[in-house]
Image (cartoon, grey):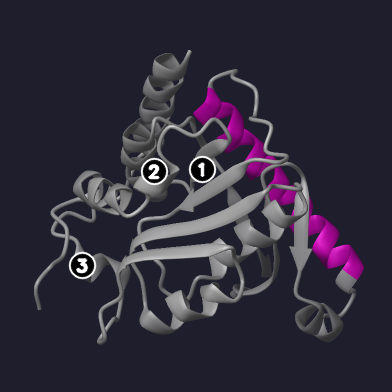
Amino acid sequence: MERAFPNRTEAGRQLAEKLVNYAGREDVIVLGLPRGGVPVAFEVAQRLGAPLDVFIVRKLGVPGFEELAVGAIASGGVRVLNQDVVRALPNAEEAIEAITARETAELERREKSYRNGRPAPELRDRVVILVDDGLATGATMRAAVAALRQRHVAKIVVAAPVGAPDTCREFEDEVDEIVCATAPEFFQAVGQYYHDFSQTSDEEVRELLSRAAQQSA
C-alpha cells in the first residue's frame, strides 16, 4: 500500500489546496485538534492566511471502562453527553461530575500551556475549519462539532488529509462541509497513510501556535 503523506506538514499542505476557496476571508479561523491535528492545521492556516488556534476535546470515559465514552468536554466549558450510556450508569450524576472535574482540569492545563497566556478566540459568527490529522471513527471530531454548535458559529468545516470512507460520508450530514483529501477504500488506521506518524509533542504544539500568533499580530 502506498503511503499518502511523508509527514503531517506535507499532509497539511495538500489538504490546504482543497480549502483555497476560504483563503483571504476575514471570518475564517482554523482550529487544530491537539496534538496531531495542529501541525496539519498550521499549514492550512498559513495557506489560507487565517488565524490558528486549538480546540481541545477530552473524552469522558466510564470509570473502569475508560474506552467507553459517556460523553466529552471541549474548549469553552461545553459538555456533550451520550444519554444511552448515562442511563446505564449506576450513580450516573455523581460519576459524571467526578470525571468531568478531572478532565476539565486537564483541558484547562493544556489550554493554558498551549496558548501561553493568549486569550481564547471569539468563535461566534465565524467560519470554523476544524482540522485533525485523520478521521478513523470520527468520535473526537464529533464531540468537537457538537461543542462548536453551542458556540453559535456561522459554519463548520471538518477537514482531514485522510479518513475512513464511511466516516467521511457520515460527516456530510453532520457538518456544513467535509473535506477528506483522501478516503482509501481499505482504510484501517490513520497512521498507515503517513511515513512519519510520530507523536506530536506539547512543545511542538506551543511553538506552532506561537509562530502563527506572531504572524497574525
**Would you say the residues marked 1 and 2 are in contact, meaning their CB atoms lie under 8 Å apart?**
yes
Quarter of the image where one finds residue 92: bottom right
Q: Is residue 64 visible?
A: no
| Label 2 secondary element | helix
Residue occupying the point 26% across, 66% down: 191
- Which amino acid type is marked by label 2? Ala
Residue occupying the point 75% across, 47% down: 151
Q: Is residue 74 visible?
A: yes
Q: Which mark is residue 31?
A: 1
Residue occupying the point 31% across, 47% down: 16
Give the image location of residue 142, x and y in percent: 60, 66
Give the image location of residue 118, x and y in percent: 59, 19
In terms of depth relative to the viewer, which is nearer, 90 or 151? 151
Residue highlighted by disc 2: 41
In terms of depth relative to the viewer, which is nearer, 81 or 178? 178
Residue occupying the point 50% across, 49% down: 129
